[in-house]
Image (cartoon, rainbow, N blue to C red):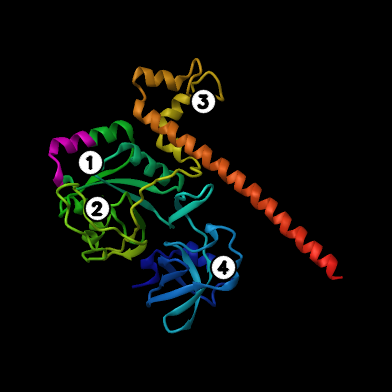
Amino acid sequence: MTIEDLGYNETLESYRVDNNLDSFEIGRVVAEHKDRYAVKTAEGEYDAELIGNLRFTAENRYDLPAVGDWVAFSEYDEGKALIHSIYPRKSIIERKAVGKSGRVQIIATNVDCGLIVQSVDRNFNLNRLERYLTICHSSDVEPVIVLSKIDLIPESDLQTIKDQINHRIKDTLVMAISHESEGYDQVENFIEAGKTYCLLGSSGVGKSTLLNNLSGQLHMKTGEISSSVNKGRHITSHRELIVLDNGGIIIDNPGMREVGIADTSGGLETTFELILEYAQQCRFKDCTHMHEEDCAVLQAVEDGEIDEAAYANFRKMEKEKDHFESDVAERRKKDKQFGKLIKRIQKEKKKHKY
């Protein structure tokens, strides 16, 4: 294996030279366990932790390593390393952190494509699919839909699902695979050497089964499919980066019960492009598309030109985005006030000292 097999490129090398990181080794974070990280190089894998300065100066989650990151590190013992710096990220797949106002959870970094896995049994949900698409679009990551467990339903039902997707979601590749082996050739041919793909989806949709079939190895144990719920019984417990034999790089991660929308940075506009096109025709520039007269979006919904369910999902996610941005603004305000308080206390202590 070479460092290029892990996705290393000329842009990263230029950054390494320009920022005088030549004296450090370079590796990619392939797993994260609380405050420790598995860092992989062409020669091997290291159990790494952050240097004190990097840990204590971190202001938020973005300042800490995540699976997919490139890092500069030094070895201090056999198989042990200290991370000194994180290289700039070309993409960050993230979601609103569960139960934490104004905070995000980083799913993976430096990803080229998101493989959104949805099983076609009772778990299939178009609204959730649009949420994953929005996360990918906001991260500037190409989304691809992988329909799994197609052996559990009749061919006619599968075609109905594909028609539903094509009606609401445009210009997105859709692939279909069975629990055993059908359809994997198409996925394998799509994956390119040196590119990073992140598996996205809820628990039990078949992400780890897909990974095991692509790699030809049992990276994640999978249970038999229950006849009562049509789900495998395993749960992936952590994120992990794996290099396939064909050179593709896969990041597997735990299933997400909640897909909270954070700062979408244009993700909603891309996912619901048709709605935004009609919005340009609204009479008022600040139209909320809820109750205004001469609202082109509402008229299109009424005329059947915009899917009513898609419109409802768009409105729900837009509210979540606005709420998240409000939480972020409030958190920043509180952090700023707390910072001022600390500075005032330090100033008072210094004054009384002399």
- Mark 3 vs 4: CB contact within 8 A: no
Crowding near pointer 2: few (<14 within 10 Å), some, many (20+)?
Answer: many
Q: Earlier in the sequence, mark 4 or mark 1?
A: 4
Q: Which residue appears at 38% of the width and 41% of the height? A: 131
Q: Residue at x 36, y 62 (%)?
A: 238
State which mark lies toward you, 1 or 3: 1
Q: Residues within 10 Å of mark 4 (few under 14, many from 20)?
A: some
Q: Residue 122 has which mark?
A: 1
- Residue 19 image point, x, y percent: 59, 68
Q: Amino acid at mark 3?
A: Thr
Per the image, the residue denoted by label 3 is 288
Amino acid type, callout 1 = Arg
Residue 25: x and y, percent? 48, 75
Instruction: State the SS at label 4.
Output: helix
Q: Nearer the viewer, mark 2 or mark 1?
A: 1
Residue type beneath disc 2: Gly
- Disc 4 vs disc 1: which is toward the camera? 1
How far apart marks 3 and 4 lie (CA) works out to 43 Å
Q: Real-space Cα distance between discs 3 and 2?
A: 39 Å
Q: Earlier in the sequence, mark 2 or mark 1?
A: 1
Question: Which badge, 4 or 2, comes first in the chain's sequence?
Answer: 4
Q: Earlier in the sequence, mark 1 or mark 3?
A: 1
- Give the residue at mark 2: 206
Q: Residue 134's quadrant in the figure? A: top left
Secondary structure character of the magenta stretch overall? helix
Q: Which residues are magenta?
A: 151-161
Task: Read off the residue under disc 4.
Answer: 55
From the viewer's perspective, tell me whether residue 112 is left or right of residue 191. Answer: right
